Amino acid sequence: MLDGLRPPAGALRLALLRLVMVVLASSPALVTALLGLDAGAARRPYFTEVPGRLPVARLLQLARDLPDGYAAALAVSVVLAVLGDQLLTGGAVALLGPRPPKERRVLAVVWKRGLTHLWPFLRAVAVGVILTAVGAGLIGALFRRLDVMGYRAGWSGEARALYLPLASVGLTVLWMAAVGALVFWCRLITAADGRRRVRRTLLLALRVFVRHPLRSSGLFVSSTVISTLLPGAVLAAWRQAEPVRGGALGLLLGGWCAALCLQAVVWIWLVRSGWLLYLHEGLADLRATADAPFGVLTWLRGLPGKLVSPRRAR
């Protein structure tokens, strides 16, 4: 696991490329939100006449007053982020693997290898979206049921209004991170072996989780949750300190940039560590598993004929 910290050739350029991708992909949504709020809601007395820090309730109201074009800009940012992540993952698996390509240009490798695996990657992401939605729905239903039970049992308002929502959000975040680990490993195995059957590859990823839970899913979930929370911590510090000029503002801006850079480095580490784990001799049987379909669709297509044939024989 620690061997993944040794950066091979091209790792730093790949991390920089991911950082640039994150900035470019988020730009449509951020620019639209900032320009729209600056021209509209942010200039209303409801927000400007508040002394000191803006209360959380008004911050949420400001978020609800986003411009009309924000939904379209957010959709563009999401599409760019998803496509960019697939291309970068395909290139990273090639560049950080045991046999890196002879091509020295990182961008060329990312483009070529990313396009090669783009379709199975997108199908893996689609499976992840479905699993995330189903899990989040079940968690939400569970905690709504707990809220009703707490109301009938006479739980305190603090428990129902604070602890239950926090537990629901925490469990949802962990579920999303676990699904993200599954999708990540599915894409890594797909690019490592040149596989095309996403359903079978997902099962291979689950078998890796069973054999090495800490080095696979555990490492991904813990590192991604921590690296994702760091920018949020910087924003919380920004709100608490209210910097407007000078060294404090520069320090927080530097902390924000450092958190984004750390995310890119963690991503490189995850790809590299995942490669090293997948090459483990204990997973040789998984690497040798054929990339063959399950034959479910073929069986379903032939099912009507199987049902009709016995009747004709009678």
Image (tube, rainbow, N blue to C red):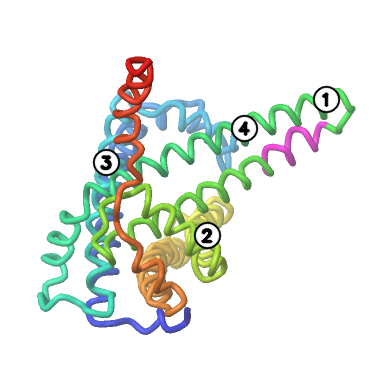
Q: Residue 79 has which mark?
A: 3
Which mark sits nearer the N-terminus, 1 or 4? 4
**Residue nearest the viewer, comparing 26 with 242:** 26
Which mark sits nearer the N-terminus, 1 or 3? 3
Amino acid under disc 3:
Val
Residue ranking furthest to the front: 314
Q: How packed is label 1: few (under 14 Cα within 10 Å), some, or many (20 or more)?
A: few
Magenta-colored stretch includes residue 193:
no
Residue 306 location (% of width, % of height)? 35, 26
What range of the chain is rendered magenta? 157-166
Residue 121 seen in render: yes
- Would you name the residue on which mark 1 appears? 151
- Would you name the residue on which mark 4 appears? 140
**Residue nearest the viewer, comparing 69 with 65:** 69
Q: How far apart are marks 1 and 3 (CA)?
A: 42 Å
Residue 39 seen in render: no
Q: How packed is label 4: few (under 14 Cα within 10 Å), some, or many (20 or more)?
A: some
- Point out the frontmost of discs 1 and 4: 4
Amino acid under disc 4:
Gly
Identify the residue shown where x is 31% and y is 39%: 29
How many marks the image carries: the answer is 4
Which mark sits nearer the N-terminus, 2 or 1? 1
Query: Mark 3 falls on what kind of element?
Result: helix
